[in-house]
Every structure is written in structure tokens, then in C-alpha cells.
Amino acid sequence: MGNRRSKHTARHRRAPADPPGGETLGSERPVRGLWGWASTIAKMVLGVTLILASVVGIAWGVFRYARTTPRFSLKDIAVEGTRRLSRDDILAAAGLHLGDNLFSLDVEAAQRALTQSPWIKQAKVTRQLPNRVLVQVHERQAQAALLANGKTFLVDETGQPFKEVGVGDPHDLTLITGLSLDAFAHEPELEHERLRAVLALIRAYEHLGIAQAYPAEEAHLQPSGAVTLNVGSSGIALHLGHAPFKQRLLRAERVLTKALRQGGTPSVVFLDNEAHPERVVVRLL
């Protein structure tokens, strides 16, 4: 009985045998788990790479097809917003031709090319599937002509000189004098503001009924800022002084209307009396 208990106790106290190779079970499991994770990640990376390669390949094939198939050849080029420039002028400037591939068109390059024209302020080129392009332009409108340093420039509706007058350009615009290119170079903001003020004066005069009989010919800006407006074929000088001009223009209209009815022709009308603005002096021819 005692021997059985001692054998049984010894059996429970005996240390377990080491596995072959001297490694324990506890160290084998982490090694196998690490290799398993690495294998899984490698397979995932390989799968994603194959998918991306397939997507890129398909996209390249679609892109190449779109740029070469006749299905996307330009059959219609619509042009909007032109007043002065012709359709042919727009297409030539943008480099657009019927038959060109819609997706081969560089939209930004075409827009930049269009705005190189001094007449075009803004341009937008839009693709319209499957074979149409829409070109929208905002042209500058010549409102007056600026004579400075012996050169004549067209002035747009914002008071910006945008090109030197050339062949085919309008020549029946009111001429603005008294400004210089040197002043524009040294104080561009101030000179542009002065130019915009004179342009506003010309517009205000053109809204008067008398402007039909005596159109504005020249607006001269003096160094002091005072303005003289010459109107009519005989060059009647309206000395308007400094802004604001609204009331002085209305007085000038009354004087010219009366002279027109009476058959007289003023040579100079002085409306620049700052102390007594209601006084008008007229000098007849």
C-alpha cells in the first residue's frame, strides 16, 4: 500500500519531457503565428496590387479609345458672346477645327489662347459629349479713344485702355486727351480713376437729348482735374470744371437747345464758376 502511494506521488512530481530538438511548445506557437500573419499580409498586398494594375490597365485602354475613336470627333463648335469678332476669328484663335478629337482638346490652352486677343476679356471652352464644343467669350466694348504720347488707344467700358488703334478698329469714338503714359506708369491707380471719371462724363452727356445734334468729340482733362468737353462738328467747348457734372451738363443742354432754336452757334460755354455754379457765360462765334 505504501509502495503504491510513493510510485503514484513520484509519477505526479516527475518533470515533463522536453520535445525533440530542445524547443518548447510555448516558443513554437508565436513563431508559427508570426509567419501566418506575414503570409496573410503578403497575399493581401499582392491582391490589391493586381487589382490596381487591372484598374489602371482598363482606364488606360478607355482613355486611349476615347482619344482615337471617330465617335468623339468634333462635329459642332458653338460660339457665343461675339459682337465684333467673327466665328472664324474665334476658332482660329482657339485652334479649334471640326474633326478634332474631343478628348485631345486642351481646354485650358484654348482659353489662354483666346484671351491673348485684346478684344477678349474672358473665355470659356466646354466639352459637350459626344462631339460638341461650346466656346463662350466676353468681348471688350470700345467706349472711347485715348490719345497719349502721340498714340491712340481704345478704352473699354471699365476705363481700361486695351489696344492701340489699328486698321479696322472704330474711329468714331470720343477722344480723351490730357493724360500721359508716363503718369500711367508711375501712378496707375490714380490715372485709371481719372480716366474712368472722364468716361462716366462722356456717357452722361451721351444720354442727353442734345447729344444727337452735338455729339461729344473730345474730352480734355486738365492737370488740375477740370474737364473741357468739345461737342458738335464745330467743336463747341463746354468748360465743365470739376466733378460732379450732372447739373452742369443739364445747364449745357439748355444753352445748346436754345442756341439751336435761335439759329446761333456758341463757341465756348463756361459752366465752371465754382462760386456761382448757376451762372453760365456763353461766347458766340
Image (spheres, grey):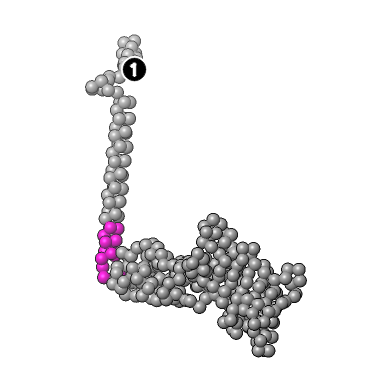
Residue 116 position (above or below residue 247): above
Residue 93 position (above or below residue 4): below
Query: Is any part of residue 207 visible from this angle?
Result: no
Horizontal and vertical percent position of residue 243: 67, 68
Residue range corresponding to the magenta coloring: 58-72
What type is the residue that disc 1 sits on? His
Residue farthest toward the front in the current orientation of the protein = 285
Residue with the mark numbered 1: 12
Image quadrant in which you'd find residue 110? bottom left
Residue at position x 64%, y 82% in the image: 285
Query: Is any part of residue 182 visible from this angle?
Result: yes
Residue 13 is a magenta residue: no
Prevalent SS, magenta region: helix
Near-viewer residue (48 or 70): 70
Horizontal and vertical percent position of residue 265: 64, 84
Residue 263 position (above or below residue 28): below
Residue 65 is a magenta residue: yes
Residue 25 as seen in the image, left or right of residue 238: left
- Estimate how packed mark 1 is, as few (under 14), some (14 to 19) or many (20 or more) residues with alpha carbons within 10 Å: few
Residue 76 position (above or below residue 29): below
Horizontal and vertical percent position of residue 229: 61, 74
Near-viewer residue (45 or 215): 215
Horizontal and vertical percent position of residue 124: 43, 67
